Each structure stands twice: as structure tokens, then as C-alpha cells.
């Protein structure tokens, strides 16, 4: 088993280990409840990814969950009901209830978005039951891979809601078929690994969870061996590009690289390219 | 045959039936002309989808055409020529001709866009000849399915025009290959069901028209059984997301759901989830 | 061999021939260096595509390279190092170095973007080694086809850089899987024709370079036989659509076509459609 | 008194006269209620401006109201209450009430926006009480002039609402002080002609209503004497510019003028410039 | 002197009192250093405005500073130098220095932006020396008022920097003269109250600090007496409007108000309007 | 008289002198024709400002014209007519004429936009007749000052055109009154210095041309004495801000400054601030 990553022992709901140099592995740790999330968990998840974002010992993050049964069954509906989050507070009028809900949703969104805003590459491994919040979370990752037996579902309409912590904002921008996005989002029907691969939701399907973690670790190790200046810049610019015109993106890129080409990594990379050696890059 | 939907008997060019509860089936009814459109037809189509949009008895719309030969052969070019729409009015100078044409195109666009703006889910079934306007119309639907024998074509360059009632604005945003979009749009070559599925234009291919209508009806019935608050919200947010950045989309979503979570549908959906019963939702 | 295209003999690094009427074929001509680019080459490439853009004798451009080994091995790193472009000038402080670099990147971007801004359709044929700059260049083309043996790679992180002349701005907008884009961009791993086709990067894969050039020429000839008013309008509107909302794109389209429908091409196209003859269109 | 404009006699709530060639004068006609609006009125207003937009006999519209006391006292709150528009329908849950309200607001917005979308120049004359809806309506006009005694107010917070039919969307884009916009919008305090002129809300202040109408008519007549191709293009491009970047606006402008310069107006205007005669332009 | 506001005693660098019901008064408390800011201060300021944002006892915030000499002299340059923030770390290459700086600037921006994101109305009172950071901070407020003797300056170019915590992003959007914005930003020249009023930077000028605080309190008390649903909605929609097209803003507004009209404030406001009484609104 | 600036003697239509260190003064030199522009002139103007943009000896540009009578009378209409630019080519159909015109307008726009894209500060001095193109050109400058007797006019509607080389795209974004912009653009009425100052079009009015040049030189000299890293960054970020949301602008600013704070100018500026000496900055 991979050693724990230093500095993360205070996180209660997530295990954080280091399977290889510069690679962190985050695992949701509530297998007895199919890794379903309650409020305290997602707030912690947000803080965790904020910390990983600036940790110089981390270049790539793998995100999966403990146990074979589920990446996550989504929102812990029972907990949500007890918190009163989804039920109207009869003491409030419609506008005040709406304000309370909006603030709550924004806080939830911020926690989930921390994965997208993490400056390091994030690879999510979807396995077993991966529904509802599983899609919101994984849409924030950079790279999605899954197991053959994964059970995926944009589940929210089944509890009477439009998905509001990211799926509807991000899913249409990360896959290639709007018809498919609308079909699965409006019907809440399950879909599997083959379909996920065909529409581009995941870029790889592996035999089982062990194999998927192995493949993720290999890919993470490869990315972690590259210049962190180059990889973090690539992530930053790609996320900017998604939300801007090509002209605007080119402008931003030229400004970004005007500073970022001034690193020792360029000569280190070129030199090791010529010498066929493995370059070493400073932390970032 | 499905019963007519109440309140739609005044529409001349389209049949509107109700194959299942909360599902409307719109069929273009000009099979003798391969369901080709003339001005009066698209104006009526616009009015029809505006009415469906707010009809509380409708949650999902299936859109197909009468007869096996064609979904539509597109614009009725002969009629268009007779109307003088495509030929210059020699009494007008270039600027005044352009103004007349722009106003005409905008009106045409508005009619077609009524399908996209319809608040209810729209499933289009493409069958037989489906060229020119067929692509403009189906790009506005939420979900596209087709028959194995469908003959698709972005036909406009063949009549000396860039497509101007929606295909060029929407097609690149609903499929995953820009190279393919440009190839079919610039060459006006035919493409079939396999290609349409591979690039994500349609999300399902069925054996023949009967099977496709059956599949559409099943899917429509499934979606119609969900909370209309959830499904209509999902459509609204996904359409917003297409045209806005992720950050803007998250903001809009939180405001949308601040009101929409305050429905009885959430508890109805959850309760029936626990009780394994079929929930009933109020009309919307 | 195709005859040279008139007016292009002064270009030193590129061959420009005319394999069929209204079709230009541009070939990078530095096979002994795997068609790697140095500064003088991309500046010339920019000027070349600017000239093609307004040349009335050209309607479609095919872009490939001389020799079987490589479309291009990308930036000529040795030449780049000698020019001092990638190494810091120790006489300058960080801000002044950044300014020098930014101006340099912008000039490089402008040359590459000339392919996108070329008003005529551009078909790129990727063959053999096609890495680094190969992706930046081909993302600007309208249509991408490749050979079975093509070796593709978003190579930049391997030299310590985020790609800055277009790949990161355009690649996510022309293929359908964000997960795949991030995987290949962050890892700099090679990918082949099958993968390129599956994600929609290319729209066709051919057996070998000869077959690919043949297919490109056939497609180019088909497009060149259509109304140039219609084809150029289609390109212009599709590029606009990529960077704007659907509503904005529809507005732009109606203004564009208000002028463009006033061509003789519409009646010529319709007439030849009825008469089953091949229409002739005026130059543009 | 100015003669009635032909074709507008069916409008019930508005007088439409023609004080000079190509100039229409629209007057809200409910002086006994301080020209307060109820639903039927704004629906008619929307239809009226849609008709003016394409009427070739109209080039400029002046918009004022009957009587000296008020341009409009805004929404007729009593009528609104009776219609149930502002009071919750207890039979509906929060989400369904919200949907009913949203549809209602959108319809109201569309009516008001018809003034902005009118292709002809609109000059509004604000006089007397001009509060609430008066600001929403006048923000849609192109040119605002007012009388010395005008009483202006962004009134909505005083009835417990954020202004939702246009003031908050347009006011910050048509005046030069955000601090002032927020002060008057959040406090609902009255402001007068001097303040309106200082912040650029109006471009002229006149002694009294008669003088203001006279000035508006003079200005309208001047604008109506110019090429309608030029004036309508100017309005269209300025409205586009407000919502787009400079680069996007330049692109749109070049496409717009590519058609619009092809008018007889250019030579007519130039010729009369040389000959010092008054040019005549065809209708548009 | 106004009583302290409950719950804010832990803030070290700012006094928070309550001069009237629902009004909070925040005062920067470092008069001996002309209220210059160091890192710990702006981080605390960010947390302070986040707390005010959701505090139901607060509807309006007045922001000024202790002492008559300065609102703030800006960044405490000496402290900044000691922190090493503005000097290069020679152990880092250019790219790593840039990353360290970018993260630092983002954190600083987030603290400042908390004023803009505060859901309650913010009135800033500029007095005495108000340079550099004073402009960044006050651009985030909703309403700006100042004293006659205020000394304003976009000071950053004088320390070799482009202003990076908000002035350049917000100032051009809140005043009406781009020529003036560029003149004061590029030259770092001082400007006074008259000029600030003429260009719309402030909406009121008062004789001295005491009078300005009095006027601010009066205005704050007026705004605090209105429906908080209406006022907070007005702020939210106006901020959205600044960054979006009119069409997008109208859409957002209709969704916002669909929930927000469902408050008791509407009937309370209307009733008290009829009865000429002072309405009471629930907290928010 | 100021000495000529080295390296600019080949420009035929413009005088380029250097009244003070790092300041260039560009003067249109066709006083006998009221400095009216023909095609060769604006193409040269574009090249001139491109050269100034990267000239390390230039930090600020003053732009005026030779002679007291006119900054420019705009387009030389006679020359334009002779070039056939404004008259239809009867050999071309409407679409082909439109294409020819669009390409022509784009080239014209690019020349004018070179002033905006010039990385150095540009101060325009408007004097005497300043109509038509005068407004397009001056809208691209950063700072506008004028003489008391200036005669300004958005003249284009008087020749049957909507202004298409920049006025309609930029004017509404640089002044504070939309009502005024529309009034002067739709009516082509003259306006003077007072009005220009009141709406924020110019930031200063001087007694006569000599005084205005003097004031411009003084301001230019002041700006030229500041860190060029800081001033050029300020211009770049302000231009970006105009076309982007506040959030986007803040992101861009943090990336920009991450490189630009790494200059020697910061310590030089701070040191000279403490020592009360005049700092010297390296060229840029």
C-alpha cells in the first residue's frame, strides 16, 4: 500500500497517499455508505484540493474511493433531509428560502469547483456505482478513466432536481454529443463504460478497479516526470480556452508563456532530450 | 393510432397526437412533396412550438413527419422562387434588397428557433430523406435519433447559399468533430446513420421508422414520468451552459435552483424512491 | 505531377501546385530536416496563406509536406536555440525578457493563424511524423485527414513549455473529448490514426500518403465545384459560430447572408440542379 | 395638431400621429391615470413598435405621453394586484409559482424590448412624473430628452422588487457613473433634470413639455432627412457594439456595410453634398 | 459614538460599529500609518466583508477610516518590501517567481473583491489621502462619496507597477470617460473631488469628513429601510449586468425575480405605500 | 521646432519629430487638403504606428496634424470616388461586390486599429475641423485633448454610410452618455469642445493649438518619465478590461503582472521615491 502523503493526516473523510513521486492519491473513505457525501465531506474535499493545489510535493492527483462497490452513490439524501437543506423552512417566505438555498448551493459549488481550480493535474478513476455527485465531481477532473463495470448516471432529476453543482455546466463542454448529454440528463438513465468511452466522457476503460488504479498511477507518474511549469501551464490555458474565444485564448497564452518560458525547465528538458537522460525539474 | 392532442386541431400543416400521457407527437404533413417546407409552414411551426412550450399537458414532444420517404426534403425551392424570396427585386438597390432579405431571414430563424426555446424536451426522429432544413430543425431539438436508412445532408451550398436558419450556428456545438462539420457543410455530401452516430449527431439508430418512433415514444414516456420541474430546469440550464462560461453557468444555475428546489416534486420523488412507487407530479 | 500555381514561385520554403481547377496544393519543402520549421519559414507561411486567401484562382487549399517521413517534426529546436529565442537574455530583467518573448510569440501566432483566417477552405493531410507544431498548424485547417501510419503528438511539454501557438486554444474546440485532450496535452504521449479518428480530430484515415493526397484532392475538387460564395460564407460563419453564442451567431449569419444571397450563384445553382448540368460560378 | 399616421388607428392605448415627413409620434393615452400601464397596454406597446420597425413610412419615432402631468407613473399597481400577477397563487408550490412568474416577466420584457429592437430611431421625451416603468421604457429609446420639471425615479425597490423589465440591465450601460446608478436604484430617491443631464441619462433638457416636443420634432426631422440606410445601420451597429468586444464589433460592422454601402444613397448624398441640394432617399 | 456591532470584536485592524439599524460602519484603524495596508490587514478585510455579506443584521455597510488625514495611503511599501513580496527570490527561476507572484496577487485580489461580492450595499467615504489601494478598494464599493479635500491618485505606476488588485479592471466600467481613466492611470497624477464628481467616480462631494459620514449614514439608513430582498437583488443584478449583454442580463433577471417576487415584502411595501406607514421587512 | 525622430524619414504623409525624450510627435501632413485621408495615407499610418509600437526609443506618441485649420476633414471623398471604392462595380453581382467591399473595409479598419494596438501611450490633439475619420482615429488614442475651437462631427451618415472604421465600435465605450452618442451619430450634427468635455470624449480643452500641443507634450513627458513596464502594462490591461468581464480581467492582470513585477523598475521607482531623485528606467 502506498505511504501516506505528509501533511494530510488531519483530513477525516479522505485518505491521501503517495503511490509515486509527486503523485497524490485521494480516496473518499466512507465505503460502508457507498461513499455517499454529506455536507461536512464536501467542505473538507474543497479544503483538501485547495491544499493540493499549492503543495510543491504534488504534481498529479488521482481521485478514487475506498472499496470496490462505489466511487460514490452521490448525495447522502437522508443526511440532506435531516439537515433540512432540501426541505422548505416554513418560517421563511419564498424569497428568503430562495436566498438561503442559493447561498447553500454556491458554497457546495465552490467546494466541488476546487477540483477544477486545483493547479495540478487531476485524474479521476470511476468505479462501481458512480452516480449523481459522481458526475459533478468527475467533470471537474482533467482526465477521466473508468472500470468496465462502472454504473454511471446523471441522477438528479430522479430526486426532482436539476443538477446544480456542476454537471449541467461542465458535461456539455467535455463530451462530443449534445444529444447524448440531454438524453442522459433528462432521463436519469444509467450508462456504462462503453457509452462513456464512445462519447468521450472517459478516455480509457480498464478491466477492474485494481487495473484502473494501476493505469492511473502509470499515467500520473508519466505526467509527474514532465516539467511542472509546462504541465500546470497546459492545464491553466486549456481551462481558460474552454470559456473564451480563440483570439482571447491566444492573447492569454502569449502573456502566460512570456513569463513561463523563463524557466530552467526548457534547457533541462532540451538537454535531456539530446542526452537521452531523465530531466529533473525544480518543485512548483 | 395515437389520439389527437386537444387544442391543436387548427394547425394545418402538422398533425399533433398524444401517444402517451404528457407526450405530444408532431408530424409534418406534406408527404406528397417529401414534407418540403414553404413559408406558411415554418411560420405555423413556430407558433406550434410556442404553444407546446407552455402547455401544461405536454412534457415531451416527439417531432417526425408523415410517410416513410422523408423527414423533409428541406426548403420547397420552387415555392421559394415563386415567392421571390431568393431572387433579387430589381426595383431595389443592394442595400434595400439586403434589408428585405435580412428581415426575411430573421423571421425564418425565429420560427425555427421556437423548437429550441420550447421549454419542454424535444426528441426528433430523422427518417428517409432528411436534408437542408432537416438539419436546421433537428439541431434545435434536444435529442436526435434516426433510422438506419436516413439520408442526411447539409444541402445549402448546393443551392449557392451558406445555411442561414441555424445549422451553421448550432451543428458545431452539438457534435464532437469540427473537421467533420466543415467537411459535410462545405461539400454538401450525403451522410448516413453510422456517421451521424459516430460523431454524436444522433444518440441512437433504429432499424426503421416504426421502431424509431417506438423508441422515441418510450424515451419520451420515461422523461415525461420525471418531475417536470427537474426536466425543464435541466433543459434550460443546459441551453444556457452552451452559450456561457462555466463560472457564469454555475451562477445562473444557483439562481435557477434557488426557486426550483422549492417544489413538492423533491419530496414526492424522494418518497417514491424510498417506497418504490411511481411518483405523481403536478403539471407545469 | 501537378503544375505550379501561377504567382507563387517566390516562396522559398513551400511548393505551391495546382492539381485541379481552383485547387492549390501547398507542400512544406524541407524533407531533409523532417520539415521542421524555423522562424523564416513560419513568417513565409503566414504570407503565403494571406495571399491564397484573396487569390480568385483558388477556392480550396491542400496542405501537406514533401517526402514520406514527416508532415513536420515541429519546431527546429536547434535553430530556435541558435536564434536565442528560447534562452534568456541576461542583459534584460524579467519584465523586459517577458515583453520580448510576448512580442515574439504573438508574431508566431499571427503566422499560424493565417491558415485559419484564409477565406478559402483548407484541407490538411497529416502523414508520418506530425508532432508539436504539426498539431498547431493542423488545428487551423478546416478539414483534417491522415494516413494510417501517422505519428501525432502534442509535444510541447517535452521541451518544458505549454504549447503557445494555437494547439491549446483550438484543439479543445475541434474534438469531442476534453479528457482525451488533457491526457495527450499533459503527457506528450504519441497517438495514432485510430485514436485521432475516434475523437474526431481527423475525419478520414487513408492507407498511405499517396492515397491521402488523392482523397484530399478529390474532396477539394468537389468543394471547388460549388459556389465559392456559399463555401466561403460557410467557413466564415462556422468560425464565427465557434466563438459566439447561438443567438449572436444567428444575428451575424442573417447580416452575412443579406448580402451574399444577392449573387448569381443561387440561380445558377438552382438551374443546374433542375437541368442536371454542372454550374459555373464566377471567381471570388 | 399633427395628422394621424395611417395604419395605426386600431391601437387603443396610444395615439400615433405624424408631425413631419417620416416622423411618427407615439403618445401613451391614459392621462387620467397618470399614464400608468397595465398588461393590455404593454402588450399593445410591443406590437406597436414592432409595426413601426418595418414601416417604410417611418424613419424616426418620438415617444411621449398625453397630458402635462406624467410621462408615466409606472406600473398600475392596483391593476397588477387585481390580475394576481404580484400575489402568490396558493395552489402552486414555490417552483410552479416561480415558473408562472418567469414566463410573465419574460413576456413583459419582450414588450418593452420592442422599443430597443425597433429598427428606426426612437427619441423619448420625459416629462412630469416619470417613474418606475418610465425608466425601463426610456432606457430602450436611442435618445432621451426631458423637461426641466421632470420627476424621475427608479421606483421598484419601493414596492419590494428589483426592477425586472430592463432598467437594471440597460441603465448602467447608458450613463457614465456606476456610483450614481447604484445610489438611485438602491434608494429609489427622486432625481431631476439637472442630475439626469450631468450623468448623461438625457442629452438635452428643455423648458417645458411643449418646447421638448418641439425640440424632439426638430431633431427627428433632421435625422429623418438623412439616408435611412445610414441611420438604421448606425443604430444597429451601436446596439451590437454595446454587447460585444471592439474586435467583434469591427467584424460585424464590416459585414454589415459590405451590403449597405451598395445603396443609391451614397451617391445621392455625395452629389447633394457637392450641389448643396437636399437629397431624397428611397424608403426603407 | 456609534455602538459596536455585535460579533465583530475579533477583527484587529478594523472597527465595526452600528450607527443606525441594519447599518454597519467599517473603519480601517491604523491612522498612525495613514491607514496603509499590509498583508494581514487585507486578508482580514476579506474575511470581514464575507461575514458582513451574510449577516442578517446588516443591510448596508459604510466603509471609511479612522482619523482625518487619510482613507488610506495605499500599500505599506516598507512592509511589502520586508515580506519579500515585491523583490525577486534569487533561488527561483523566472517561471517559478512568476508562479509565486501570481498566487500572491490572486489572493490579494480575492480579499479586495470580497467588498464587491458582499451581498449588502457598500458605501465608501473617501477622505484625505486616498491613493493606490484606496482606488482599488473603493471601485468595489457600490456608492462612492468623498470630501472636498480628498487627494485621489491611481498611484501604482509610481512604484513601477500596473495596478493589479482591481483598479484597472473596474475603474473603466464605473466612470464615463476613458480618456480620463487613461490619463490618471498612466500619469499617476493626483485628482480631487471636483474631477471625481465630473467623471462620475463619486456621486456626491461633502464639505468635510464629518459631513460625509453623516451623509453616508443618512443614505445608508434610507436604503436599509427598504425591502432587503429588493435592494440585494438590485445589487446582484446590476453587478451581473456590468459583465453581460443586455439579453443575457434580462434572462438572468427574470430567473432571479421569479423567486424573489415571492416575498412578503411586496405586499408589505404596497400596503405601507397605501397607508403611508413605514413598512417592516424580515431580515435577510 | 522639435528634431525629427530617427528612423522615420521614409514616411511620406506624416512628420515624426521628438519634442522630448521618449516622446514622438506624429503630424498628418496634407494641410492643403485639410489633412483629408486617401488610401495610401491610412495604409502608411498603420505601418507607422506598428513601428512606433515596438520602438524602444518611444514611450509616448502625440498625434496631431500640420496647420491650424484641421486635424482632418476625414476621408478624401473625391479620391475615394476616383478609386471606385464607394461605387458599385457593375461587372460584379451583389455578393461579389460585398466581398470586395468587406475586404477593403477590413484593411482600412486594420490600419486605424494600429493606433489602438500600439503598445505605447497615444495622446491625440484635436484641433480645427475634426470630422468623420477624425473621430475614428481619435477613438483609438488613449487620451484625447482638444482646442476650444475644435469642430467635431460623426459625419458618416451625411455620405449615406454607417461609420465603419471604428467610431461606432469604440465611441460608446469611451464616453458616458449613450443618448449623446446616438444623437450625434444619427444626426451628424457638429459638436464643440464644451460638449466633448462634458460627455468625457476629451479630458482637457486648451485655448488654441499651440497651447494644446504644449499641454500634450507636458503630459507626454510626464508619462514618459515613468516606468515603461508599468505604463505599457497599464495600457494593455485597460484595453483588455474594456472587452472582458471584471473576473476575466482580474485573471488576465494577475498573469500579466506575474511576469512584469519582475523588473528592475520596481526597486528603481521605490528607491527614487525614498531618495526624492528621478529614476531612470531601461528602454522597452
Image (spheres, coloured by chain):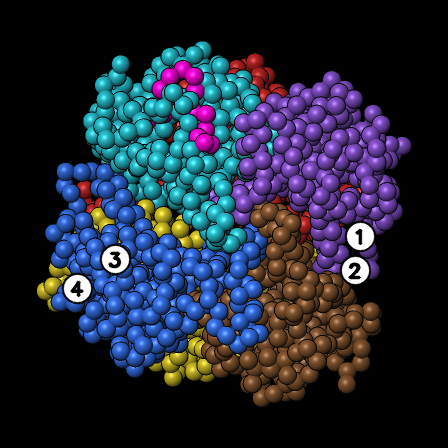
Chain colours: A purple, B red, C cyan, D yellow, E brown, F blue
C-alpha distance separating marks 1 and 3? 73 Å
Of all chains, the one bearing label 1 is A
CA–CA distance in space, label 1 to label 4: 75 Å
Q: Which of marks 2 and 3 is in front?
A: 3
* Residue F139 versus residue A241 in the image, above or below: below
- Residue C64 in magenta stretch: yes
The residue that disc 1 covers is A88
Look at the numbered discs 2 and 4 and tell me whether their residues touch, using CB distance below 8 Å. no
Both labels 1 and 4 in a single chain: no
In x, y percent, where is residue F137? 30, 61
Judge if badges 1 and 2 mark residues of a common chain: yes
Is residue B273 visible in this depiction of the protein?
no
Q: Name the residue under label 4.
A: F30
Q: In this view, does B260 lie to the left or right of C73?
A: right
Tell me what residue is drawn at x 60 percent, y 69 percent. Answer: E133
Which residue in the rendered view is the most extreme toward the left?
D275
Mark 2, residues whose alpha carbon is within 10 Å: few (<14), some, or many (≥20)? some
Q: Residue at x 25, y 57 (%)?
A: F8
Q: Where is residue C224 in the image (x, y as percent from the top left)?
A: 29, 24
* Highlighted range, magenta: C59-78
Q: Mark 2 points at which residue?
A: A92
Mark 3 or 4, nearer chain start:
3
Question: From mark 3 to mark 4, how far is it between C-alphas?
Answer: 17 Å
The x and y percentages for residue B147 are 53, 18
Amino acid at each position: 500500500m502506498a505511504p501516506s502523503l505528509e501533511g494530510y493526516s488531519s483530513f477525516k473523510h479522505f485518505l491521501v497517499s503517495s503511490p509515486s513521486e509527486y503523485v497524490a492519491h485521494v480516496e473518499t473513505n466512507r465505503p460502508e455508505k457507498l461513499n455517499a457525501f454529506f455536507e461536512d465531506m464536501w467542505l473538507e474535499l474543497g479544503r483538501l484540493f485547495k491544499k493540493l493545489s499549492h503543495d510543491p510535493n504534488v504534481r498529479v492527483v488521482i481521485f478514487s474511493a475506498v472499496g470496490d462497490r462505489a466511487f460514490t452513490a452521490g448525495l447522502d439524501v437522508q443526511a440532506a433531509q435531516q439537515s433540512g437543506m432540501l426541505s422548505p423552512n416554513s418560517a421563511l417566505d419564498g424569497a428568503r428560502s430562495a436566498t438561503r438555498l442559493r447561498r447553500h448551493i454556491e458554497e457546495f459549488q465552490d467546494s466541488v469547483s476546487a477540483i477544477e481550480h486545483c493547479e495540478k493535474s487531476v485524474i479521476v478513476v470511476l468505479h462501481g456505482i458512480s452516480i449523481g455527485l459522481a458526475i459533478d465531481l468527475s467533470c471537474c477532473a482533467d482526465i477521466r478513466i473508468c472500470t468496465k463495470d462502472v454504473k454511471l448516471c446523471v441522477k438528479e432529476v430522479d430526486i426532482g432536481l436539476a443538477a446544480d453543482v456542476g454537471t449541467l455546466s461542465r458535461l456539455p463542454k467535455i463530451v462530443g454529443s449534445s444529444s447524448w448529454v440531454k438524453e442522459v440528463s433528462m432521463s436519469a438513465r444509467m450508462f456504462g463504460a462503453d457509452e462513456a468511452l464512445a462519447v468521450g466522457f472517459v478516455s480509457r476503460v480498464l478491466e477492474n478497479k485494481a487495473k484502473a488504479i494501476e493505469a492511473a498511477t502509470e499515467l500520473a507518474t508519466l505526467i509527474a516526470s514532465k516539467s511542472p511549469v509546462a504541465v500546470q501551464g497546459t492545464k491553466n490555458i486549456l481551462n481558460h480556452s474552454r470559456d473564451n474565444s480563440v483570439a482571447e485564448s491566444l492573447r492569454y497564452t502569449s502573456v502566460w508563456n512570456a513569463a513561463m518560458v523563463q524557466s530552467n525547465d526548457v534547457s533541462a528538458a532540451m538537454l535531456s532530450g539530446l542526452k537521452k537522460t531523465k530531466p529533473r525539474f525544480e518543485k512548483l
